[in-house]
Image: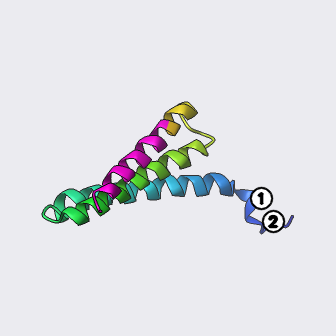
Amino acid sequence: MSSTDPSVHCDCRAVSVRRAIVVSIVVGLAAAVARSAVFRDAPAAQAACGTVAGLAVAAYGIARLYDRDRRLPAWVYAAVVLAGTTLATLWTVRLF
C-alpha cells in the first residue's frame, strides 16, 4: 500500500455511514417542513413529501444498523426501519 491510499488514513466505511446518516436526517427534515409549510393545500404533494420523509427515516435506521459506533441496540434501529417503511407505505397509499 502506498501512503497516498485513502484507506491507510481513514475508515471509509465509517465515513460513508456517517454521510448517509446526515443526508437522511436532512432529507427527512426538508420533506417534513415542505409537507407542512409549503404544500399545505396540495394533498398529493403532502403525500409525496410524507413518502419521502418515511423513506428518509428508514434510510436513517438502515445506516445506523451499519454504524459501528451506534449507541442503542440493533433492534431499536430495526424498529426505526420498520416505522419508516410503514410511514412511507401509508403516505404512498394516499397518492392513489
For the magenta stretch, what is the residue range? 79-96
Q: Are marks 1 and 2 in contact (CB under 8 Å)?
A: yes
Callout 1 amino acid: Val
Query: Quick one: which residue is furthest to the left in this view?
Result: 41
> Taking 81 as reference, is 41 left or right?
left
In whole angstroms, how far apart are the C-alphas of marks 1 and 2? 7 Å
> Taking 5 as reference, is 46 left or right?
left
In this picture, is 74 found above or below 88?
Answer: above
* Disc assigned to residue 3: 2
From the top left corner, tell me how far across and down residue 4 is, in percent.
77, 69
From the top left corner, tell me how far across and down residue 61 is, in percent.
50, 45
From the top left corner, tell me how far across and down residue 30 is, in percent.
31, 60
| Magenta stretch secondary structure, dominant | helix
Residue at left 57%, top 34%? 74
Residue at left 41%, top 41%? 83
Callout 2 amino acid: Ser
For disc 1, the neighbor class at 10 Å (few under 14, some 14 to 19, many from 20) is few
In this picture, is 36 found above or below 42?
Answer: above
Q: How many numbered markers are drawn? A: 2
> Taking 78 as reference, is 37 left or right?
left
